[in-house]
Amino acid sequence: MKAIIKKEINQFFNNPYGFIVLTLFGVFANFLFVKDVFVLGVVSMKSFFQLVPWIFMIFVPALAMRSISEEKRLNTLEVLRTLPITETQIVIGKFAALIFASTIGLLLTVGLPISLNAISSSAGSLYLPEVAIGYLGVIFYVVMAISISLFFSGMTSNQVVAFLLSAVTLFLLNMAGSEFLGTVLPKVVQDILLVLSPLNQMMPFTNGVLDIRSIFYFVSVTAVFVFLSVVDLEKRS
């Protein structure tokens, strides 16, 4: 499995595509947050934690769409199966490499709380433990998004189709907790959608609270889609 992780990371960073995706993510995330800070004049990272899942909704599928679909298109997946590794190890290896790449993208935003804390007055400085928990929530969201995107990457050999399926699925999940749906759907349905919404599950993290229910949600959804990716790969063997 270590060989799979190393192969994926090397392939990612030996290709300009990986640097372009990460650079664009860093530019968009930093610019959009800084713009809001100067408009609102509030020393807080909450708006960043509310914004960044929408950005990752696009960039995670962009990172993951090549993971398995490219192997299928180039017929190199069969070569991987001839190695002494299981389908589970293939999926976990690619999953771990995508987490590594996404973490690097997230590290490009760490300068935001550091700079914001430095320029703010002592009375209005950031509460850093709250920021750390907010970042933890973002990591949970990203890992879940990777598991979903990896699943759709394994469903097709077309990278564009994999990207669209992943992005649309994440968009629908994000929208499940939107106020707009609350105005057009019955309350019972709205309550169910709120439970399914990752944005709603991220709210405790955004407020600096570790909620075991939210952690269970992200871990469960991630585990389900990783399992489905393994099952799909085994069916095609």
Image (tube, rainbow, N blue to C red):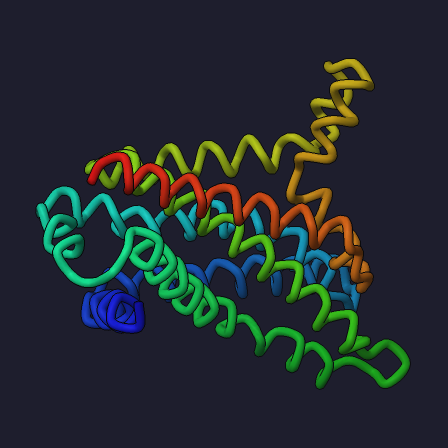
Return the residue found at the far front.
84
Q: Residue at x 57, y 50 (%)?
A: 53
Residue 84 image point, x, y percent = 20, 63
Judge left or right: residue 58 versus residue 5: right
Q: Residue 118 is drawn in which quadrant?
A: bottom right
Residue 76 image point, x, y percent = 11, 52
Q: 227 and 146: which one is in front?
A: 227
Count the labels in the image.
0
If the image is split into quadrants, where does the N terminus sit? bottom left
Q: 38 and 150: which one is in front?
A: 150
Q: 164 and 113: which one is in front?
A: 164
Residue 106 image point, x, y percent = 51, 67
Q: Residue at x 74, y 19 (%)?
A: 189
If the image is split into quadrants, where does the C terminus sit? top left
Residue 229 image point, x, y percent = 37, 43
Judge left or right: residue 37 versus residue 123: left
Q: Is residue 15 above or below residue 183?
A: below
Q: Residue at x 66, y 59 (%)?
A: 137
Q: Residue at x 73, y 71 (%)?
A: 131
Q: Residue 160 is drawn in which quadrant?
A: top left
